[in-house]
Amino acid sequence: QVQPVESGGGLVQTGGSLRLSCVASGRTFETAAMAWFRQAPGKERECVAAINWTGGRTYYSDSVKGRFTISRDNAKNTVDLRMNSLKSEDTAVYYCAASAFSALQSALGAYHYWGQGTQVTVSS
């Protein structure tokens, strides 16, 4: 079992940058695929970035490709999301999630363990 805890959200101006961090407890972290999801008011939760257990494969949604970077450090049990060139439409609650699977996953149903979420607000 893996329990993620996010940090790093906040208020930033359009065009700015933020880094979200996730620390995940649990002995199985290093074999778990990880992801960052987000949910804006009135919208479904969507996967914006995912990474497989080794860190060798990544996924990005079209809306963030080229602006966001996901990375992991299995020695520290951490997964980071670096967000650049932020837009107002990036405003959402961001969740770190862990899968019971090791291979790269982007589907909501593939993730079994969730953090409490951290708010990211991009102001114009």
Image: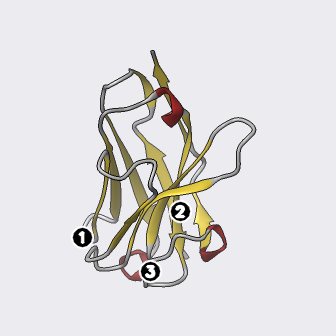
In the image, residue 62 sits, relative to residue 75, either above or below, namely: above
CA distance for labels 1 and 3: 12 Å
In the image, what residue type sits under mark 1?
Ala
For the point 31% across and 45% down, the residue is 67
CA distance for labels 3 and 2: 13 Å
CA distance for labels 1 and 2: 18 Å
For the point 63% across and 67% down, the residue is 108
In the structure shown, which secondary structural element does the residue marked by tag 2 occupy?
Answer: strand
56 lies left or right of 58: left
Measuring from the top left, give residue 60's x and y in whole percent: 40, 60
In the image, what residue type sits under mark 3?
Thr
Mark 2 neighbour class, 10 Å CA radius: few under 14, some 14 to 19, many 20 or more: many
The circle drawn on residue 97 is 2
Residue bearing the label numbered 1: 75
In the image, residue 115 sits, relative to residue 8, either above or below, namely: below
In the image, residue 94 sits, relative to residue 119, either above or below, namely: below
Residue bearing the label numbered 3: 28
Q: Quadrant of residue 58?
A: bottom left
